[in-house]
Structures are given as structure tokens and as C-alpha cells.
Amino acid sequence: MANMCSLCGIAEIQSDGKRWCLKYQVDVSDGSKEIKPDCYYFIEPQSEAGEPMSASQNLMLKEWELASRRMRGPV
């Protein structure tokens, strides 16, 4: 479970090789103490037309998904 953040689609790879969470603005590289084991924003890296989506696109997709869940409910 500790490696979940480093495998997340919103973890952007920095120039020094570390992974940076775009949502929480923390280092999520392997061995980092900032890892969140039960993050609502975890998303598998997505691709569109065979090309991987950027971390910011994955974050936007996940935010839309979470927002649509809040809109569901009894009418």
C-alpha cells in the first residue's frame, strides 16, 4: 500500500526523478514519509488514443469523477 502514491496517475515525475503529487503538493517518491495510504484521489495512469495523459489531466479527470459522485443521491 505504501507504493500507491508513486504509482498514481497524478504523481508527476520531476526532473530529478522524484514523483510529486499535484493534488497535495508533496513528494511521493518511494520511501517518502508524505504517502497517504487511503487517498480519495488515487487514479491509475490513463491514456487517450494510445498516448498517456499528463498528471494534470489525470487530476482533472479524478476531480470530475468525485464531483459527479457527490451529485448522485435521492431525488
Image: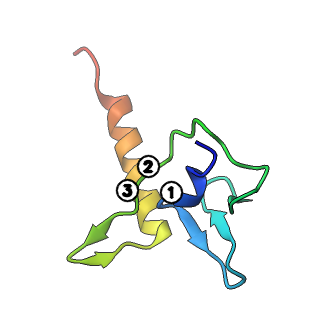
Residue sitting farthest toward the right: 33
Which residue is depicted at the point 29% across and 26% down?
Answer: 72
Q: Which mark is residue 62?
A: none
Q: Earlier in the sequence, mark 2 or mark 1?
A: 1
- Can you identify the residue that label 2 sits on? 63
Q: Residues within 10 Å of mark 1 (few under 14, many from 20)?
A: many
In the rendering, at what x and y percent does residue 34 appear?
75, 50
Q: Which mark is residue 8?
A: 1
Label 1: state its secondary structure: loop
Label 2: state its secondary structure: helix
Q: Are marks 2 and 3 in contact (CB under 8 Å)?
A: yes
Q: CA distance from mark 2 to mark 3?
A: 6 Å
Q: Is residue 32 left or right of residue 19?
A: right
Q: Is residue 16 left or right of residue 37?
A: right
Which residue is depicted at the point 30% across and 69% down?
Answer: 47
Q: Is residue 28 above or below residue 16?
A: above
Q: Is residue 19 above or below residue 6?
A: below
Label 3: state its secondary structure: helix
Report which quarter residue 12 is drawn in: bottom right
In the rendering, at what x and y percent does residue 1 appear?
58, 42
Q: CA distance from mark 1 to mark 3?
A: 13 Å
Q: CA distance from mark 2 to mark 1?
A: 14 Å
- Can you identify the residue that label 3 sits on? 61
Judge depth for marks 1 and 3 and give the one in front: 1
Amino acid type indicated by mark 2: Glu
In the rendering, at what x and y percent does residue 10 appear?
52, 61
Judge depth for marks 2 and 1 and give the one in front: 1
Which residue is depicted at the point 42% across and 67% down?
Answer: 57
Amino acid type indicated by mark 3: Leu
Residue sitting farthest toward the top: 74
